Image (tube, rainbow, N blue to C red):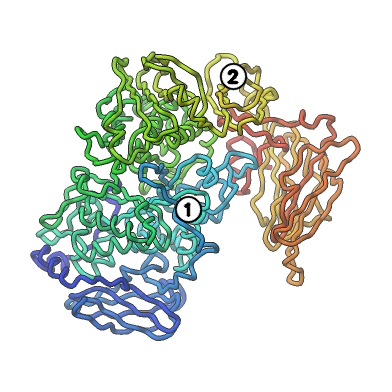
């Protein structure tokens, strides 16, 4: 975490010297430490019991409110009750009869002559901006099917692969394809079928993308309730990472669709987790117990100067750089951390925890959390919940005798508590800022790289007991993105962060090869695999949303890099020694001798019989290709272009390693005998400028083994004309990697657009995001399948007459009308509408069939004289769903409709699309003006 100056500090002068010996003061309060598990509000329909630990308070009252803030409805409390102190436990309590479900509350805590209002530190729900706690029945917050939701776990921590993202960054961009209402929110994770810019048939985004990428865990940056975003205002106008805790046990409200209702954020957070679990992906929660947003926090107001480390002059210790440090060595904050972590694990099914600035916590607390998780479930599966954190050595005023959970003390921690390895991070690409380089740029820092490759578990140099204690990475949310670091270190001030540079793409791939084949837990910043940029911003915690959010269009621009990461994950999963949780492999790596300058390599023996026996991994950080000696017969699985389980080529005794690249090989004998196969074939396509023969970009096209591919029809593209092709441009995907070359020239002709709108027929207002279709002037366009709109049905007797046609210079608008479903209509009847339309927009026929939800249906493919069906619509067959489904059958008068189709090859963005509409369809009317501006198209 690098967020200097982010957190507020507003402790009063009177609080700075409550006592003089703060360690003795805390030790005295520790004598009243409470061991019960019922702090907070315990709800039933008949009564709610409130309990708060504050042993030195003079009095405590609970205040009940109808709303979560004074800006909603009637201000002021609807009741207030005095609480009673149990002097043996230090717990104040009161039971209030009646049903207080979803009522809000605070405590008024008096110390000496000062009374402060505070939320409940043990609150599980809260109102807008977390200023009031809420009484909640958690069983009412469970989404459908939650009882069947299970943890997603791996056997050992080293079996994990982690992809880091924030809720906001994941989907705030329109390019995510997520509906506008859910962008930047929990529910974005629940949307299926999202594609880049909402283009039908385009590359997948969001959770569908992650499923294909192959990562096993998503680490989500803070989504507990934090203080730096005003939940009552439009979140799209604000941004913060969220490392500023307010309510540790409540989800953040700005990520919900209704932050004023405390139960909504809980349910939607669970829906996010459930969606990831359904995709087979575990969820790691980024937790920040080392400091609070303000020193005048709920903790401080409840028990002043106990939950924090205090300096002798009465000021707060500030090792965190955020104005205060919490005191995990104090018994009730240790308990608080344990209770909080186990609550999130059990109630929200969290699969792992990343501890921000873990080096500020003590060893005993961290080990106690590990033990609590291990004992969480009777079947012992809690031991598989991941734990790791930032074990930086930081100056903090902890109590005498406290041993901090920093790197130097890591061997005193459980072998299942990991720490980020900054040594390999800096050895890969240089320091976190600045323009210095390291191995991937110039082949330097090989000694440090070796230490990191061993997962810091080499008995002579490492700080870890075993690789499960080491998180191996090149970039995370802190500091420069990997690609930005590469731009700055190679091109300096002349570099453009959002530009594709082929040499930097190679370095990015090399970095991934190092991380994913090293011992330890491989970790990457979300989007690193498509060369994510923040325009050189080294500390973007409070920068603009635009600066931070993922640009999903890069999925196409850097599709070859994504495929490379996918292949590396497959290789790691297929060879157990890469993820050995013991130190055996780390201490038995055999490094190649007599390698050229800037090169390092090693052989690694497997720990699993019956699989591949031995692998050889070679990294070349130098500026030129190198021939490297590696005795034996080998099958190359990864080179500078592609990676996976496929046989790229066979080599004996030596191999050529291109500049800034890796080669990963398996011994030929075991490769042939083990039968480990990739389920996909691959063809590497290199795009060249036809005039200069300069490489524009590479792309890896993948497909199921045995299926065919054909690049011979790449006659023209939207932004390039294909002039010639060479190599394996037609064939069947096999376990051998194919190679093809495409030579192109830039198209400088006119681009035309069609806007497809969906309106309420009574008032002509748009009721659904419109589509923007773009293509070359003179090309054919068709209408895609029409959306199903809740509580509406398509008006079939007033369909537009220009739903298909030829694009010309003028922009066109196609309008489809919908009418509201009336109250007297049977809502259980499901409809499927078929629209048969020719290439001039003429409606040939319409048909409606009805059925019940879940029942199968099949639409007929009508035949018409001198008209051919362009292609069978995806929804021509399916099952009835609630409401209606609208399917468009498009027909062409051309004897060969396929000749009308324009196979799209976005050489500039790397996306191959073959749409029957021969056009690109952008969902969202609000996006229209931006896209048209990019195309230099004037709106009529």
Q: Residue sitting at 46 percent across and 22 percent down?
A: 668
In which image quadrant can residue 626 be found?
Answer: top left
Point out residue 336 in the picture as x, y percentages from the top left corner: 28, 64
Vertical arrangement, residue 76 with respect to residue 274, above or below = below
Q: Residue 316 shows which numbered tag?
A: none
Location of residue 299 (image quadrant): bottom left
User: Split into 4 quadrants, where in the image is the C terminus?
Assistant: top right
Foreground residue among 546 and 588: 588
Residue 712 horizontal/vertical position (percent): 68, 22
Q: Which secondary structure lies at badge 1?
A: helix
Find residue 741 and name its label: 2
On screen, residue 782 versus residue 644, left or right, reads right
How far is disc 1 from disc 2 in space, using C-alphas? Answer: 43 Å
Q: Nearer the viewer, residue 755 or 707?
A: 707
**What residue does disc 1 label?**
236
Q: Is residue 291 left or right of residue 833?
A: left
Residue 81 placement (x, y as % from top left): 32, 84
* Residue at the extreme right: 865
Circle 1 residues within 10 Å: few <14, some 14–19, many ≥20: some
To which quarter of the image does residue 866 belong?
top right
């Amino acid at each position: 975490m690098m967020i200097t100056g982010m957190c507020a500090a507003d402790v009063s002068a009177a609080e700075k010297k409550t006592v003089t010996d703060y360690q003795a003061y805390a030790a005295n309060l520790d004598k009243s430490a409470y061991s019960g598990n019922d702090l907070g509000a315990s709800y039933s329909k008949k009564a709610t019991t409130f309990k708060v630990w504050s042993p030195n308070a003079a009095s405590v009252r609970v205040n009940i409110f109808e709303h979560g803030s004074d800006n909603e409805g009637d201000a002021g409390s609807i009741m207030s009750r005095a609480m009673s102190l149990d002097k043996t436990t230090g717990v104040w309590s009161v039971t209030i009869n009646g049903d207080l479900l979803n009522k809000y509350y605070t405590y008024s805590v008096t110390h000496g002559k000062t009374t402060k209002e505070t939320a409940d530190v043990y609150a599980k729900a809260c109102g807008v901006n977390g200023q009031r706690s809420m009484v909640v029945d958690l069983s009412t917050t469970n989404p459908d099917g939650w009882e069947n939701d299970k943890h997603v776990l791996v056997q050992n921590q080293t079996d994990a692969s982690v992809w880091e993202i924030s809720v906001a960054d994941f989907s705030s961009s329109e390019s995510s394809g997520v509906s506008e209402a859910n962008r930047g929110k929990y529910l974005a994770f629940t949307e299926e079928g999202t594609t880049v810019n909402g283009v039908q048939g385009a590359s997948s985004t969001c959770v569908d993308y992650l499923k294909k990428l192959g990562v096993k865990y998503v680490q989500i940056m803070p989504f507990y309730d934090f203080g730096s975003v005003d939940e009552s205002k439009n979140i799209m106008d604000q941004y913060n990472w969220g490392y500023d805790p307010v309510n540790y046990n409540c989800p953040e409200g700005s990520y919900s669709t209704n932050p004023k209702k405390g139960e909504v954020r809980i349910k939607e957070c669970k829906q996010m987790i459930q969606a990831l679990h359904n995709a087979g992906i575990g969820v790691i929660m980024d937790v920040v117990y080392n400091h609070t947003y303000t020193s005048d926090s709920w903790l401080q107001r409840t028990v002043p100067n106990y939950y924090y480390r205090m300096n002798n002059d009465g000021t707060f210790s500030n090792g965190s750089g955020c104005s205060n440090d919490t005191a995990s060595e104090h018994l009730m904050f240790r308990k608080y951390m344990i209770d909080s972590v186990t609550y999130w694990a059990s109630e929200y099914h969290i699969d792992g925890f990343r501890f921000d600035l873990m080096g500020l916590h003590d060893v005993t607390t961290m080990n106690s959390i590990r033990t609590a998780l291990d004992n969480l479930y009777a079947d012992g599966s809690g031991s598989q919940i991941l734990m790791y954190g930032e074990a930086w050595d930081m100056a903090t005023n902890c109590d005498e005798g406290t041993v901090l959970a920093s790197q130097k003390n890591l061997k005193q921690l459980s072998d299942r508590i990991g720490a980020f390895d900054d040594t390999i991070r800096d050895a890969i690409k240089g320091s976190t800022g600045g323009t210095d380089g390291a191995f991937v740029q110039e082949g330097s820092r090989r000694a440090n790289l070796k230490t990191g490759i061993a997962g810091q578990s080499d008995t002579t140099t490492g700080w870890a007991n075993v690789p499960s204690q080491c998180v191996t990475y090149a970039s995370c949310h802190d500091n420069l993105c990997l690609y930005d670091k590469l731009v700055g270190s190679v091109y300096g001030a002349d570099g453009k962060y959002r530009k594709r540079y082929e040499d930097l793409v190679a370095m990015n791939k090399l970095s991934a090869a190092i991380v994913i084949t090293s011992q330890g837990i491989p970790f990457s910043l979300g989007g690193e695999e498509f060369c994510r940029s923040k325009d050189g911003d080294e500390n973007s915690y409070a920068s603009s949303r635009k600066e931070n959010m993922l640009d999903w269009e890069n999925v196409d621009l850097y599709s070859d890099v994504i495929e490379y990461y996918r292949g590396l994950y497959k290789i790691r999963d297929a060879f157990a020694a890469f993820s050995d949780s013991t130190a055996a492999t780390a201490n038995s790596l055999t490094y190649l001798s007599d390698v050229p300058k800037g090169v390092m390599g090693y052989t690694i023996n497997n720990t699993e019989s019956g699989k591949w026996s031995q692998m050889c991994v070679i990294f070349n950080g130098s500026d030129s290709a190198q021939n490297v000696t590696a005795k034996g017969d080998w099958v190359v699985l990864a080179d500078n272009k592609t990676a996976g389980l496929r046989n790229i080529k066979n080599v004996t005794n030596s191999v050529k390693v291109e500049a800034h690249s890796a080669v990963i090989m398996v011994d030929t004998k075991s490769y042939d005998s083990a039968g480990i196969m990739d389920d996909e074939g691959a063809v590497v396509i290199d795009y060249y400028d036809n005039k200069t023969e300069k490489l524009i970009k590479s792309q890896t096209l993948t497909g199921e083994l045995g299926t065919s591919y054909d690049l011979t029809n790449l006659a023209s593209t939207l932004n390039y004309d294909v002039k010639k092709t060479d190599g394996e441009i037609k064939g069947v995907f096999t376990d051998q990697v194919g190679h093809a070359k495409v030579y192109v020239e830039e198209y400088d002709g006119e681009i035309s657009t069609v806007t497809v709108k969906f309106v309420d027929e009574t008032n002509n207002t748009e009721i659904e995001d419109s589509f923007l279709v773009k293509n070359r002037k003179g090309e054919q366009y068709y209408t895609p399948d029409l959306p199903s709109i809740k509580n509406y049905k398509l008006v079939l007797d007033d369909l537009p007459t220009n739903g298909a046609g030829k694009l010309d210079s003028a922009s066109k608008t196609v309008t489809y009308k919908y009418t509201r479903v009336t109250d007297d209509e049977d809502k259980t009847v499901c409809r499927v509408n078929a629209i048969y339309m020719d290439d001039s927009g003429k409606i040939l026929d319409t048909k409606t069939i009805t059925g019940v939800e879940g029942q199968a249906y099949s639409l007929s493919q009508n035949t018409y004289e001198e008209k051919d069906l362009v292609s069978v619509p995806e929804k021509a067959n399916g099952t009835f769903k609630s409401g209606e489904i609208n399917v468009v059958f498009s027909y062409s008068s051309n004897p060969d409709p396929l000749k009308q189709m324009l196979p799209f090859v976005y050489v500039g963005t790397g996306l191959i699309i073959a749409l029957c509409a021969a056009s690109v369809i952008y969902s969202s009317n609000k996006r229209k003006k931006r896209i048209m501006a990019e195309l230099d198209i004037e709106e009529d």
